[in-house]
Amino acid sequence: MSNTDNVVLTGIKPTGMPHLGNYIGALKPIIEQSKTHKTFMFIADLHALNTIHDAKQIKQHTYEIAALMIALGLDMNNTVLFRQSDINEIYQLNTMLMNVTPKGLMNRAHSYKAAMDKNIANGEDVDAGVNMGLYTYPILMSADILLYNADIVPVGADQKQHVEFARDIAGYFNHTYGNVFKLPEPVIGKDTGLIPGLDGRKMSKSYDNTIALFAPEKELKKKIMRIITDSRLPEEAKNPDESTIFQLYKHFASESEIADFADMFRRGGLGYGTAKTMLFEKINSVLAEPRAEYERLMANTDELDTILQSGAKMAAMVAEKTMQRVKKAMLG
Ligand code: TRP
């Protein structure tokens, strides 16, 4: 469906260092897509505000995401990389979209409903701890998407509803004011399957079983050595599809390496210690160079500022034009 003329847009919230599961499921596909598509990629610092109230942290995490995407090979020739909050029009469009967004739509947002359900389960007021940033989160996200005329928005399954809301809101707007906005299309990345964490459950911060993407080499090794395995002896045959070690390996190795590794599992004679060492060496060989570049960029945040500022200039050119159309349509 996507072709090279389509504008791809996505945002990443600066809430901390992503883990290997985030990398495999979300970041890697965006980086691949940037090689063939005009891409708007921003760090959604305004979206982090409803949970992080410490400016220093937001700023630091913003640098981390920018450095990380560049280090991993985001194609900077096709990509406009910028900080969401640097574009004045985002605040403006957010205000405008408030007026065509039904309150009932926000009541149905998964993120808000999850917060309400949690409050109810804890016997608290339904809206305890819910600020308007959380409640209107989907409006700001719609503004992100519509401001840059995005055709395609690659997101994880958890964000699909938000992109559908952007489409709905664009539709309400166009219905009232004429054809101002393009209708965006959510694209859910192909299912990477479950990416297991150290304990075999889905890798997730909430299970405390993650491996940080750019963990220093020593920590990476330590974590991998801690992966929980069953008690099969080295000589016993093993099913690779049931092994966390193999499930992680296959996202970093070539087809033939994957086939060889699977064979070693099935044949027997491969101990888990050796398998873990092989996994560590594979992941480390893929990530060593990007990790060094990440560390270099983090030590040179001036360079990141320059990149983000030049991205913001390009993004602003598109944003200004959209906002002119919106103001004219709404205010005359
Ligand atoms: N809400 C997204 C997340 O939490 C981040 C985001 C903000 C985004 N604005 C966006 C993603 C616009 C896609 C398009 O992951």
Image: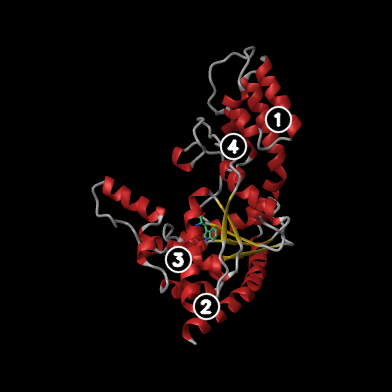
Camera-side residue of 186 and 95: 186
The residue under label 2 is 178
Residue 219 is labelled as 4
Q: Is label 3 in contact with label 2 (beta carbons under 8 Å)? A: no
Q: Tag 1 or tag 3, which sits nearer the N-term?
A: 3
- Horizontal side of residue 162 vs 242, given as left or right: left
Q: Tag 2 or tag 1, which sits nearer the N-term?
A: 2
Q: Tag 4 or tag 3, which sits nearer the N-term?
A: 3
* Amino acid of disc 4: Glu
How far apart are the two marked residues, 1 and 4, measured between alpha carbons? 24 Å
Q: Is residue 230 visible?
A: yes
* Amino acid of disc 2: Gly
Q: Tag 4 or tag 2, which sits nearer the N-term?
A: 2
Q: Nearer the viewer, mark 2 or mark 4?
A: 2
- Quadrant of res 86: bottom right
Q: Tag 2 or tag 3, which sits nearer the N-term?
A: 3
Q: Is label 3 in contact with label 4 (beta carbons under 8 Å)? A: no
The residue under label 1 is 258
Element carrying mark 3: helix
How far apart are the two marked residues, 1 and 2, measured between alpha carbons? 53 Å
Q: Tag 4 or tag 1, which sits nearer the N-term?
A: 4
Alpha-carbon neighbours of circle 3 within 10 Å: few (<14), some, or many (≥20)?
Answer: many
* Amino acid of disc 3: Ile
- Residue 91: x %, y % from top left: 49, 73
